[in-house]
Amino acid sequence: MNKTIQDIIERRSVKKYMAKSVPDELIEQIVKAGTYAPSGMNKQAAIILAVTNKEMRDRLSRINLDIVMARNMNTTSGHADPFYGAPVVLVVLAKKDVATRVYDGTLVMENMMIAAQSLGLGSCWIHRAKETFETEEGKQILQELGIKDEYEGIGNCIVGYAAPDALKPQVERKSDYVVWVK
């Protein structure tokens, strides 16, 4: 089977990571793959915040958890860290004035998750990026980073080395997933 297709099929959402840092060279490859995602009219509306700084990573995790707690949601499976211990958070944002921003950002996320898989790393899409950067603290973070345009959070792609017991078996695809029209 083609290696790219195999990586797509074998990719899983990883929710437990080893306490091991990811080399910058691998992160650079992942974000580069993200920058080559298709975008509506090639506007390239998305940007990626490559967060490896532990303080900023923990700050984003806390904001995300505050949103979960405010909604009384149980989406973190009892974990105090919505990022499941992953050392890297790749936040995808997209310009608010671009009509295809959500689609464009979603493609960036997918490219990065497949790239992580191809490099032997685990990844998972963590929601609430939109809500994170709608908070005053989220807006402040963008200001601190010198990001001036109006952006909407699309997703958080967490990345790291999967813990040995983190990978779950593949779930069978539903039988009516594809409708052939020949």
Image (cartoon, helix red, strand yellow):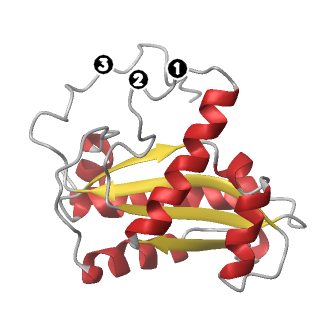
Query: Mark 2 Cα within 10 Å, few/some/many (few <14, many 20+)?
Result: few
In the image, 86 versus 6, the foreground residue is 86
Residue sitting at x 44%, y 67%: 55
Q: Real-space Cα distance between discs 1 and 3?
A: 25 Å
Q: Is residue 116 visible?
A: yes
Asked whether the beta carbons under mark 1 and mark 2 sit within 8 Å of each other, the answer is yes
Q: Is residue 42 visible?
A: no
Q: Amino acid at mark 2?
A: Ser
Q: Real-space Cα distance between discs 1 and 2?
A: 6 Å
Q: Which mark is nearer the camera, 2 or 3? A: 2
Q: Amino acid at mark 1?
A: Asn
* Residue furthest to the right: 97
Q: State the image coordinates of residue 24 (x, y, percent, origin top left).
A: 29, 81
Q: In the picture provided, is 100 more to the left or to the right than 20?
A: right
Query: Mark 3 Cα within 10 Å, few/some/many (few <14, many 20+)?
Result: few
Asked whether the beta carbons under mark 2 and mark 3 sit within 8 Å of each other, the answer is no
Q: In the picture provided, is 133 more to the left or to the right than 90?
A: right
Judging from the image, what secondary structure is the residue with disc 3 in?
A: loop
Judging from the image, what secondary structure is the residue with disc 1 in?
A: loop
| Mark 2, residue position | 77
Q: Real-space Cα distance between discs 2 and 3?
A: 23 Å
The image quarter containing residue 169 is top left
Does 175 appear above or below 7? above
Q: Amino acid at mark 3?
A: Glu
Residue sitting at x 15%, y 43%: 163
Residue sitting at x 73%, y 57%: 133
| Mark 3, residue position | 172
| Mark 1, residue position | 74
In the image, 33 versus 135, the foreground residue is 135
Q: State the image coordinates of residue 28 (x, y, percent, origin top left).
A: 36, 81
